[in-house]
Image: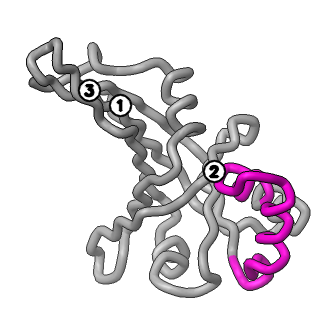
Amino acid sequence: MFRKMRRFKQQISDEQSKELLKKTKRGILSLAGDEGYPYGIPMNFYYDEEDYAIYFHSAKEGHKIDAIARNDKVCFTVMNNDRIDEKDGWSYHLESVVVFGRASIVEDEEVKWSRARKFAGKYFPSDKYVEQEMHTGGMERMALIKISIEHMTGKTVHEK
């Protein structure tokens, strides 16, 4: 169903891909937008290895929610900061992960708050700030979106 990577020598392991998802703070969510135009938007996110899912928050209405309602198939891409290897002729090194899956709004309140706490823990320095953000940041007004991962491929690029 999903294509194999053409340049398979650049493929990184599933474990490396998962580590990149855990460490990276932002990615690009790609959806089928209005009038069939692609819609890509940068997102903060949380990767939950146990659920094999990616979570992000959203307003309860808008372009993103409308696009997911029309077509729940999404792509989510992350990449680390490239680095330059001066010893190797100023070559660039970059790793990325492309995830394909289906997006849905988390309806279960217990799951919503549990995953939102984990999400906030990735971005805030302490539990105190997480709890403060959870209760003053408008979580009641927000939707939590889950991408159930169907396929994931990571790769490394080394370019001169």
**Is 105 drawn above or below residue 156 in the view shown?**
below
Q: Position of residue 79 (x, y in %)?
A: 38, 41
Tag 3 near tag 2, CB within 8 Å = no
Pointer 3 local density, CA inside 10 Å: few below 14, some 14–19, many at least 20:
some
Q: Amino acid at mark 2?
A: Tyr
Residue visible at 39% across and 61% down?
30
Residue visible at 80% across and 80% down?
136
Tag 3 near tag 1, CB within 8 Å = yes
Q: Is residue 134 left or right of residue 96?
A: right
Q: Quadrant of the C terminus?
A: top left
Residue 95: image tag: 1
Q: Closest to the observer: 148 or 112?
A: 112
Q: Quadrant of residue 144?
A: bottom right
Q: Is residue 108 magenta?
A: no
| Main SS, magenta residues | helix
Q: Quadrant of the N terminus?
A: top left
Q: Position of residue 7 (x, y in %)?
A: 22, 21
Residue visible at 70% across and 56% down?
124
Q: Position of residue 42 (x, y in %)?
A: 42, 63
